[in-house]
Amino acid sequence: MNARRAKGEAMRKGDTDGREQARQRVDLVKHQLGERGPAWWTDGAPDWNRHMVLNTPYAEWFISLTGEQGADA
């Protein structure tokens, strides 16, 4: 957020050099957070979205947390 604030300040002041430096800091942080760069979701792992948890490999874990096993889970 500091880098984004710095970018905004630089833009309001018309400081093009400061804006570019802040923009590069924002880009660096976004890469470090995984928001930019190679897509992690294309690693070939199965996508279990839109499945009931009881129909996934996470069923045992879910049951251990909730005790729920039926269709109402």
Image (cartoon, rainbow, N blue to C red):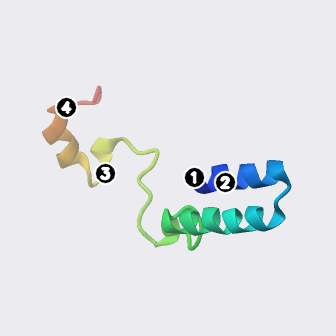
Instruction: Return the residue nearer the eye: 11 or 61.
Output: 11
- Amino acid at dot 1: Asn
Instruction: Return the residue nearer the eye: 20 or 65.
Output: 20
- Amino acid at dot 4: Glu
Quadrant position of residue 39: bottom right
Q: Residue at x 56, y 73 (%)?
A: 38
Dot 3: element? loop
- Amino acid at dot 2: Ala
Q: Residue 36 bears which disc, if any?
A: none
Assess disc 3: are there few (<14), some (14-19) or many (≥20) residues with their C-alpha within 10 Å of its C-alpha: few
Disc 4, disc 1: CB below 8 Å? no
N-term mark: 2 or 3: 2
How far apart, in angstroms, are the residues tagged by discs 1 and 2? 6 Å
Dot 4: element? loop
Kindly identify which residue carries mark 1: 2
Q: Residue at x 28, y 30 (%)?
A: 71
How far apart, in angstroms, are the residues tagged by discs 4 and 1? 44 Å
N-term mark: 4 or 2: 2
